[in-house]
Amino acid sequence: MQKTVSLPFMLLGILFNVCLVASNLLETKVIQLGPITATAGLIVFPISYIINDCIAEVWGFKKARLIIWSGFAMNFLTIGFARLAITLPAAPFWEGEESFNFIFGLAPRIAIASLLAFLLGSFLNAYIMSKMKVATQGKYFSLRAILSTIAGESADSLLFFPLAFGGLIPVQALLVMIATQALLKSLYEVIILPVTIRVVKYIKKIDQTDVYDKDISYNIIKIKDLQNRSLYGYPFFKKRKPVATSISIPTRIARSSGAIPGLCKGHISSASGGRPPKVQKTPGNSCK
């Protein structure tokens, strides 16, 4: 069967992965915004939650689960490649090794904390978005997007900072960092919400889909069901329309089907899908 991927889904998936990888690299810089001190990853990371909301709203939890795991895999590969590059010996004349190691040499403890926090926060965000959509019958998208983001970002911060900096930073300072990060990221969602609403409406319109997650499994590791043919329907996979063809009936077949002796100008029309062929008469033919 010929299958194609929905373009909006593919583009959002690519953007999701780019934002995750970029946010981890930008985390190495600390920025000052007035009285607020945060990492530069704050600029990009909340976009991943906005994309998560869009995917869960339009295509449902199953597609969100697929994208979340793809983001995890891309982050894991990036960290692995970076560690390999750091391990390789530098050229004697190259003077940028210290800066390179500072940017790409994410400590294993911080890397693990980041990956685990991402999984927890993203899946919680998608789960709440999915459940609330069914409970509200698709209404109150703005409220659902904000509440799911607050829950997901809070869970992300609550797991990441203790795992990454526990024992290194005083508990009071950790609590302030957790609250600040969760608040700023959630505020980001509120500010960008008008754009999110328009994007969701546009995608639903062009993809002609609006999934409600009824009677599905929320098991986060159950991704093999995406291989089932029942999921090949538009928009994630689109079936190609049957292409009609026309072929001439051989003389002996025409005669055996009841045509009078002689050449038969009948044609057989066939289309994919398993339907039996039918004979179509053409002007001047001798088929009965």
Image: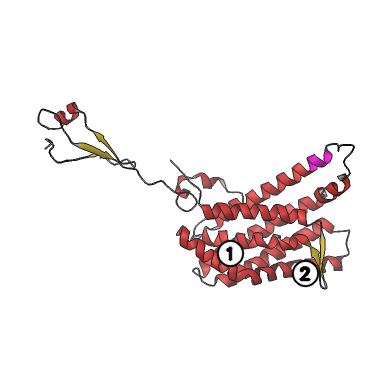
Q: Which residue is mark 1?
A: 129
Q: Nearer the viewer, residue 182 or 19?
A: 19
Write the residue at 44% across / 42% down. Answer: 2
Q: Residue 180 has which mark? A: 2
Q: Nearer the viewer, residue 36 or 144?
A: 36
The local secondary structure at tag 1 comes to: helix
**Rounded to the nearest whole Å, what is the CA distance between mark 2 and mark 1?**
23 Å
Say above or below: 80 vs 45.
Answer: above
With 20 as the anchor, is 53 left or right in this view? Answer: left
Image coords of residue 23 (percent x, y)? 73, 56
Write the residue at 69% across / 71% down. Answer: 187
* Residue 20 picture quarter: bottom right
Image coords of residue 142 (percent x, y)? 58, 71
With 99 as the anchor, is 58 left or right in this view? Answer: left
Q: Give the magenta-colored segment's residue range.
A: 83-87
Q: Nearer the viewer, residue 70 or 248?
A: 248
User: Given this view, does label 2 or label 1 mark the residue nearer the observer?
Assistant: 2
For the question of whether residue 260 can be seen, the reply is yes
Q: What amino acid type is highlighted by mark number 1?
A: Met
Q: What amino acid type is highlighted by mark number 2?
A: Thr
Say above or below: 75 vs 169.
Answer: above
Q: Earlier in the sequence, mark 2 or mark 1?
A: 1
